[in-house]
Image (tube, rainbow, N blue to C red):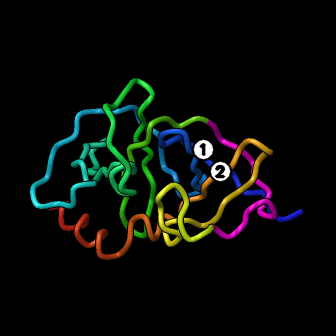
């Protein structure tokens, strides 16, 4: 048995993704976003979260998937990446699971159109259930973080 990791499970379309609990600060319901000019298309704006301005990106858009209308199930997962907090819009946040690190395999080059650099691995939870684990450092890579930090003026 490998080490147990606590993973927050969320959905984009029919795929399930996960991030480690220690990277997640909170999970919020959708709320109005303030657009910020001259930002990449996947950055949807900023929210004021308990007095802190937090940039928010749409993970579907970030991964080149078609955007959809937000629903009552849509959530903003607030994650810490280095020194800043970033919100990620997902279709739904479903679950928290304990995952044995032995179940995690290296990702193939592309999964559901998402390049391997954005992934930490793929976990086979059951015969029917695969979980794609995100590499937050790459999803929120340094160049984009510099752009995000410039929003916090």
Mark 2 Cα shell of 10 Å, populated few (<14), some (14-19), many (≥20): many
> Which part of the image, by quadrant, shows the C terminus?
bottom left
Residue 86 is a magenta residue: no
Does 57 sit above or below residue 14?
below
Mark 1 and mark 2 residues within 8 Å of each other at the beta carbon: yes
Mark 2: which secondary structure?
A: strand
Numbered tag placed on residue 131 in the rendering: 2
Give the side of residue 75 with respect to residue 106, left or right.
left
Q: Nearer the viewer, mark 1 or mark 2?
A: 2
Horizontal and vertical percent position of residue 108: 62, 68
Residues drawn in magenta: 95-107
Relative depth, front residue between 126 and 146: 126
Magenta segment's dominant SS is strand
The disc, 1 or 2, on the residue closer to the chain's N-terminal end is 1
Check disc 1 and report the residue beneath it. Answer: 9
Q: Is residue 147 left or right of residue 141?
A: left
User: Which image quarter holds the N terminus?
Assistant: bottom right
Q: Give above or below for 44 relative to 153.
A: above
């Amino acid at each position: 048995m490998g080490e147990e990791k606590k993973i927050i499970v969320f959905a984009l379309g029919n795929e399930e993704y996960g991030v480690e609990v220690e990277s997640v600060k909170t999970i919020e319901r959708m709320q109005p976003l303030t657009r910020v000019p001259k930002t990449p298309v996947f950055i949807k704006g900023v929210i004021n979260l308990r007095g802190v301005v937090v940039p928010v990106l749409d993970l579907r858009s970030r991964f080149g998937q078609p955007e959809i209308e937000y629903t009552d199930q849509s959530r903003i997962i607030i994650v810490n990446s280095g020194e800043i907090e970033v919100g990620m819009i997902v279709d739904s946040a479903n679950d928290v699971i304990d995952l044995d690190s032995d179940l995690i395999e290296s990702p193939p080059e592309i999964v559901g159109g998402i390049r391997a650099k954005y992934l930490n691995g793929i976990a086979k939870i059951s015969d029917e259930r695969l979980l794609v684990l995100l590499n937050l450092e790459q999803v929120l890579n340094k160049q984009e973080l510099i752009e995000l930090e410039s929003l916090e003026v």
